[in-house]
Image (cartoon, rainbow, N blue to C red):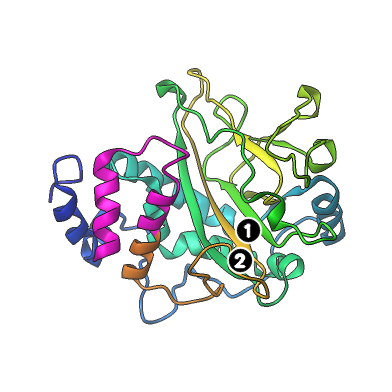
Amino acid sequence: MADSAILAPGALAGDMLRAEFWRERFPALTLPEATPSAADPAPGAAGEADERTLAARLAEEGYFQDRNATFARLAPLLGEAVSACAAMDIPPAFIFLFDEAWACFRSLDPMLRRFLGPDYRMLPDFWTWRVDGAAGQAGWGPHRDKGRMSLAPNGAPLSLTVWAPLSAATPLTSCMYVLPANRDPVYNTENEGRWQINAASIRALPGELGDYFCWNQAVLHWGSEASRFAPHPRLSMALEFQRGDIGAFNQPLIPPFAALDLRTRLKLVAKQILQYRHMYPLAARFEALAQQLLAG
């Protein structure tokens, strides 16, 4: 079976609907089945840091960093899958077809319940990055995910982003950078689009496998440009969440432990390819592929 570099988008979209297409290429990962996957753990302890410290950091600085055993266990497999997507010449967001990607974020259930309430939902907003310094690549530029609309009147988050490295993320390979909320003079104001950045206030967020970063969606952040001396590409993934007792920031909202079949996951990946086209150069063949998957 030829891969996407020589297949027309319509033909490739048809192949992608077959579970065998993915099993042949990603034998170490698990596709959705009728029975629960071993990759998908029951909710457990989300991380290692003290919850009061995380809450204080989220309230004051707008973000925090923690470690998680499920991320540590599954990140190497998912990193290999990102590299496999690159070899197939398809967007790395296709790793969200597999149970292992969802299992990582589902393991954060206790933390998400604490900050977003027991009825929180997953947003249909996720992405995967492969930032290659040898190709002069960079992460996404400075932005706020949803801005001040994602904060309650008291400043508490209505939605959160969770970002995790799938390879070591350093200033050399490209890590995340953030302007902490308490160092951002236009944070949660009507002038939030007119950034005022004091260089000394910028904070680098290097991370290892097993780390994850959580920020509210009004925090200014970005991915840096990788050095050509980086020892490997920076691989990472992110998924967004919101409270369940407010209007949807995007549709469809997804219950955190919903059973998502292959076709549904394919449509969700296609949605990401199209909805983030303003953040990265989108090749015409990928746009056509996403349109085909959404129509399938």
Q: From the image, tell me which residue sits under label 2.
A: 107
Residue 40 inside the magenta-drawn segment: no
x and y, in percent, of residue 137 in the image: 46, 27
Under circle 2, the secondary element is loop
Q: Residue at x 21, y 66 (%)?
A: 18
- Mark 2–mark 1 distance (CA, rounded to whole Å): 9 Å
Q: Amino acid at mark 1?
A: Ala
Judged left or right of residue 8, residue 274 is right
x and y, in percent, of residue 151 in the image: 74, 57
Residue 291 inside the magenta-drawn segment: yes
Q: From the image, tell me which residue sits under label 1.
A: 69
Crowding near the residue tagged with mark 2, few <14, some 14–19, many ≥20 C-alpha atoms within 10 Å: many
Q: Is residue 73 above or below residue 251?
A: above
Front residue of 190 and 278: 190
For the C terminus, the image quarter is: bottom left
Q: Is residue 291 above or below residue 242?
A: above
Judged left or right of residue 247, residue 194 is right
Q: Residue at x 18, y 59 (%)?
A: 15
Q: Residue at x 14, y 54 (%)?
A: 11
Crowding near the residue tagged with mark 1, few <14, some 14–19, many ≥20 C-alpha atoms within 10 Å: some
Q: What secondary structure predominates along the stretch shown in magenta?
A: helix
Query: What residue range appears in magenta?
Result: 269-296
Looking at this view, name the residue that lies furthest to the top.
Answer: 229
